[in-house]
Image: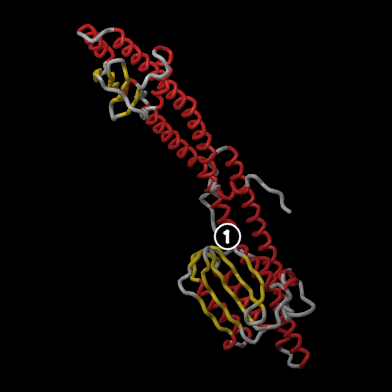
């Protein structure tokens, strides 16, 4: 049983690209910090300031209640209330003979608590009062000995008015920081993306001549290592191709002389020798094709439908079975490939199918980010556990389907080498026709 990984679900939700992962790494702590600051400074500060302002208003209300109850009705009390209203900027009025009925409504709980505390300290705990919040004023009504004292308190005396400014500045600063992070991250990630594209193009056999190291020191070192690796691989391919070309030339010269001498002989032994010499030439050409691999040919856009049809014609002509091959190729699939190499690869697959089957179906289609060339035959096939052996150079299968019958054992090895040189692969599986399916997959 696999152990539980606490971050497995988090990894599934993470973006796959380096740019967005780095962006999340930078933005997440900033957002968390702002949330903490908003709570610790803004929310707490806002609550504390509101409580202080409410206590101040409660003290004013307590003073006005004491003032109203300390003086008898008359001019003096009214003058004192008018002066308090001017100084405190409250609207104060007395409703003679009125009373507050229960239950008392308190729509401003942050104001009700301080009023309760003030009245408890100054006027007793049973003092009836009610508070209601309006758009611009808070309405406070307190029951006094000869009626109800009503006060309209401006909201700015109860609630801190700079909350929206604080939030606005936080949002603006966050957007500025995010924009700066995006700009710098893009500049840092772009060299890595260029290196990835260059490595991908090189893996598909395409030219990357315009690639130059750039970016941070670590990225530059990786780019220089990539360039060094590319030069070594290209030098190795060139040396191998030149060596095998020289060997082929040296061997074909005596073979040509032998062919000329055998052409002048007409006996049965000479005929058998001529067949052996032809087989030796064919094997020598296959050795050279395998050693050459992808070297020498430029990568150019080509219509794969034309390549598949040409390969089918070439294989059918060599095996004398044009009516045994059916091609169903989706038109208009154009990608950058080494045309001759890909034709050789497809020809090898069709030729191999014609060796061991009576009928061969060839299909070309696009499947998402890949192009697939499917070669199906109705031959004996290969057991699943032995299919990988068929790709080993110079290897012959002893039982079942003998893929290298009459050949050098390089047909499938050359085909897979060409497929992988284009960034794709060659896979063997069971065919719907009962034999073997060779699936050539190339990236678009």
Residue at numbered disc 1: 204
- Vertical side of 17 occupied by 171: above or below: above
Regarding residue 338, the answer to whether it shows in the image is: yes
Measuring from the top left, give residue 200's x and y in whole percent: 57, 55
Q: Residue furthest left?
A: 75
The residue that appears at 59% across and 67% down in the rendered structure is 441
Q: In this view, does 438 lie to the left or right of 47?
A: right
- The residue lying toward the viewer, choosing from 411 and 358, is 358
- Vertical side of 395 occupied by 201: above or below: above
Q: Report which quarter residue 7 is drawn in.
A: top right
The residue that appears at 48% across and 29% down in the rendered structure is 39
Measuring from the top left, give residue 107's x and y in whole percent: 36, 30
Regarding residue 444, the answer to whether it shows in the image is: no
Q: Is mark 1 on a helix, strand or loop?
A: loop
Measuring from the top left, give residue 113's x and y in whole percent: 42, 22
- The residue lying toward the viewer, choosing from 113 and 330, is 113
């Amino acid at each position: 049983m696999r152990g539980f990984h606490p971050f497995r679900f988090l990894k599934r939700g993470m973006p796959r690209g380096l740019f967005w992962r780095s962006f999340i790494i930078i933005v997440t702590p900033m957002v968390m910090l702002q949330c903490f600051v908003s709570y610790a400074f803004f929310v707490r500060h806002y609550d504390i300031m509101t409580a202080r302002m409410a206590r101040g208003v409660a003290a004013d209300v307590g003073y006005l209640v004491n003032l109203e109850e300390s003086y008898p009705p008359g001019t003096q009390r009214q003058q004192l209330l008018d002066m308090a209203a001017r100084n405190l900027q409250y609207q104060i009025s007395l409703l003679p003979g009125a009373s507050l009925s229960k239950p008392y409504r308190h729509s401003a709980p942050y104001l009700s608590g301080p009023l309760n505390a003030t009245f408890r300290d100054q006027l007793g705990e049973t003092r009836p009062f009610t508070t209601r919040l309006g758009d611009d004023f808070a309405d406070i009504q307190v029951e006094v000995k000869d009626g109800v004292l009503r006060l309209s308190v401006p909201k700015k005396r109860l609630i801190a008015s700079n909350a929206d400014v604080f939030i606005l500045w936080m949002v603006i600063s966050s957007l500025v920081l995010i924009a700066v992070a995006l700009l710098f991250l893009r500049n840092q990630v772009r060299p890595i993306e260029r290196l990835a594209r260059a490595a991908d193009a090189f893996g598909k056999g395409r030219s990357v001549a315009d690639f130059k190291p750039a970016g941070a020191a670590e990225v530059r070192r990786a780019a220089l290592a990539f360039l060094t690796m590319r030069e070594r691989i290209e030098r190795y391919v060139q040396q191998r191709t030149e060596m095998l070309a020289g060997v082929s030339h040296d061997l074909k010269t005596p073979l040509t002389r032998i062919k000329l001498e055998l052409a002048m002989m007409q006996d049965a032994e000479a005929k058998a020798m001529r067949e052996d010499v032809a087989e030796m030439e064919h094997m020598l050409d296959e050795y050279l094709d395998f050693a050459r691999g992808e070297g020498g040919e430029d990568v150019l856009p080509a219509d794969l439908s034309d390549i598949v049809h040409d390969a089918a014609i070439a294989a059918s002509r060599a095996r004398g079975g044009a009516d045994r091959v059916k091609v169903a190729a989706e038109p208009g699939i154009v990608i950058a490939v080494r045309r001759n190499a890909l034709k050789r690869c497809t020809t090898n697959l069709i030729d191999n199918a014609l060796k061991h089957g009576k009928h061969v179906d060839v299909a070309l289609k696009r499947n998402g980010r890949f192009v697939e060339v499917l070669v199906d035959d109705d031959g004996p096939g290969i057991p699943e556990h032995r299919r990988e052996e068929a790709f080993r150079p110079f290897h012959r299968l002893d039982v079942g389907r003998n893929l290298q019958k009459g050949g050098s054992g390089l047909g499938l090895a050359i085909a897979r080498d060409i497929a992988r040189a284009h960034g794709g692969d060659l896979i063997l599986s069971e065919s719907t026709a009962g034999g073997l399916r060779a699936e050539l997959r190339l990236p678009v």
